[in-house]
Structure formats: structure tokens, C-alpha cells
């Protein structure tokens, strides 16, 4: 089973959570990255195997977390 990947992304001065390949899925935007992370962690915990990729304001990936078994067969 493939994992679901969620991205925490900047949206202007706020932060949103989106599922990879889709638009924003958050019912609202969050004022802080920390609040968006809490929301994403709840989603990821419910949809294991899953992964969260946290982006910086410039769009580059800052951190990644994996929930449940990692379905990849290769290391890294």
C-alpha cells in the first residue's frame, strides 16, 4: 500500500496542509506553522502509512516524518 503524503506549505503569511497532488485540504488556514503541524499529524496518524513534509517559507523541505510502516523497499 502506498503512503499518503501531506505537505505543510506557506500560504501568504499563513500555513496550510495539503495532500500530495491536491489543493489545500485544510478547512481553514493556520496562523502558525505549529498549528498546521498539529493538524497534519492528526491526519497522518489516521491514514497510516503516511508522511508529512514540512516546507520552509521559501518552499524548500525542512523536515519529514513518516507514520506507520515505510512501504519503500530501498534504504533512505
Image: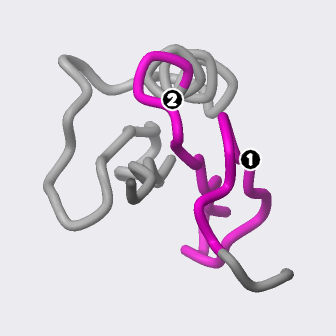
In terms of depth relative to the viewer, which is nearer, 57 or 37? 37
Residue extent of the magenta highlight: 45-72
Q: Position of residue 6 (x, y in %)?
A: 44, 48
In terms of depth relative to the viewer, which is nearer, 12 or 34? 34
Q: Residue at x 59, y 23 (%)?
A: 41
- Which quadrant, please, contains the C terminus? bottom right
**Residue placed under numbered mark 2 in the picture:** 44
Q: Is residue 54 above or below residue 48?
A: below
Q: Quadrant of residue 57?
A: bottom right
Does the segment drawn in magenta span residue 14? no
**Residue placed under numbered mark 1 in the picture:** 65
- Where disc 1 sits, the SS reads strand
Mark 2 or 1, nearer chain start: 2
Q: Residues within 10 Å of mark 2 (few under 14, many from 20)?
A: many
Q: Mark 2 touching mark 1, by CB under 8 A?
A: yes
Image mark for residue 14: none
Residue 54 shown left or right of residue 65 in the figure = left
Amino acid at each position: 500500500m502506498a503512503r499518503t503524503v501531506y505537505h505543510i506549505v506557506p500560504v501568504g503569511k499563513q500555513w496550510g496542509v495539503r495532500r500530495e497532488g491536491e489543493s489545500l485540504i485544510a478547512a481553514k488556514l493556520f496562523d502558525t506553522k505549529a498549528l498546521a503541524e498539529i493538524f497534519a499529524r492528526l491526519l497522518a496518524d489516521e491514514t497510516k502509512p503516511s508522511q508529512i513534509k514540512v516546507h520552509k517559507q521559501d518552499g524548500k523541505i525542512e523536515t519529514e516524518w513518516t507514520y506507520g510502516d515505510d512501504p519503500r523497499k530501498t534504504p533512505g
